[in-house]
Image (cartoon, grey):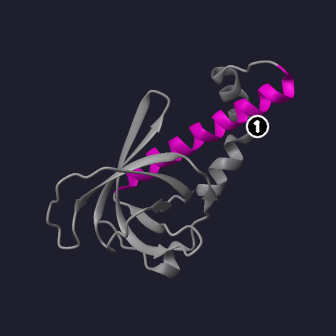
Amino acid sequence: MKKDYNFKDRRKFIRHPLTFPLRYNILSDTKGVLLGKREAKSTTINISIGGLLFSSRHALDKGVLIDLKMPFGDKVFKVKARVVHCVKNIDTKFFNVGVSFHRLRDAFKVKLIEQLYLISEYRDLRSVQLGREVTLEEASKDWIKRYSERFRRLYW
């Protein structure tokens, strides 16, 4: 059974500001009633091992179950999450939606996606620094050698 984290508990997880695209569908309301799928596009604001924060044009009720789709290249990673808070951002007029992952394996998927995006950004940086196109494989090997232990310690 998944633990619902209260606001104080969620703050124990380190948050990483990371922006990548996502799409989401509301799967069920707060009473567990299944809803028709209505996909919306968004981007992440930050992520942690416990969940993520993304922006939404629409308010989402606390407790609803959503399906997140996060593309990377030609792959789409799917995870389920539960809305734990939704607050209107007065600057952007969008809603900041905080979700907790529904299962532990969903948290692992998002950690993998984060690593992929970080490696991709590292690839772009190294290409500029070296003045040549760095392959994804080359960047991956270098990134893993340089940063994987530090990245692991941030989460575990």
- Provide residue 12's location: percent of width, then percent of height: 57, 72
**Quadrant in the picture for the C terminus:** bottom right
Residue 134 occupies which quadrant of the picture?
Answer: top right
Q: Is residue 63 magenta?
A: no
User: In this image, 96 relative to 19: left or right?
Assistant: left
Residue 77 occupies which quadrant of the picture?
Answer: top left
- Provide residue 13's location: percent of width, then percent of height: 57, 67
User: In this image, 38 relative to 85: left or right?
Assistant: left
- Provide residue 65's location: percent of width, then percent of height: 28, 62
Q: Residue placed at 50% from the left, 77% from the top?
A: 9
- Provide residue 63's location: percent of width, then percent of height: 30, 72
Q: Residue placed at 22% from the left, 51% from the top?
A: 37
Q: Are there few (<14), some (14-19), or many (20+) residues within 10 Å of tag 1?
A: few
User: In this image, 30 relative to 67: left or right?
Assistant: left
User: In this image, 81 relative to 88: left or right?
Assistant: left
Q: Nearer the viewer, residue 152 or 24?
A: 24
Residue 141 occupies which quadrant of the picture?
Answer: top right
Q: Nearer the viewer, residue 121 or 94?
A: 94
Region in magenta: 103-131
Would you place residue 103 above or below residue 117 in this image?
below
Secondary element at image label 1: helix
Q: Amino acid at mark 1?
A: Arg
Q: What is the count of numbered marks?
A: 1
Q: Residue placed at 43% from the left, 73% from the top?
A: 86
In this figure, which residue is indicated by the disc labeled 1? Answer: 146
Q: Is residue 128 magenta?
A: yes
Dominant secondary-structure state across the stretch colored magenta? helix
Q: Residue placed at 52% from the left, 81% from the top?
A: 8
**Quadrant in the picture for the N terminus:** bottom left
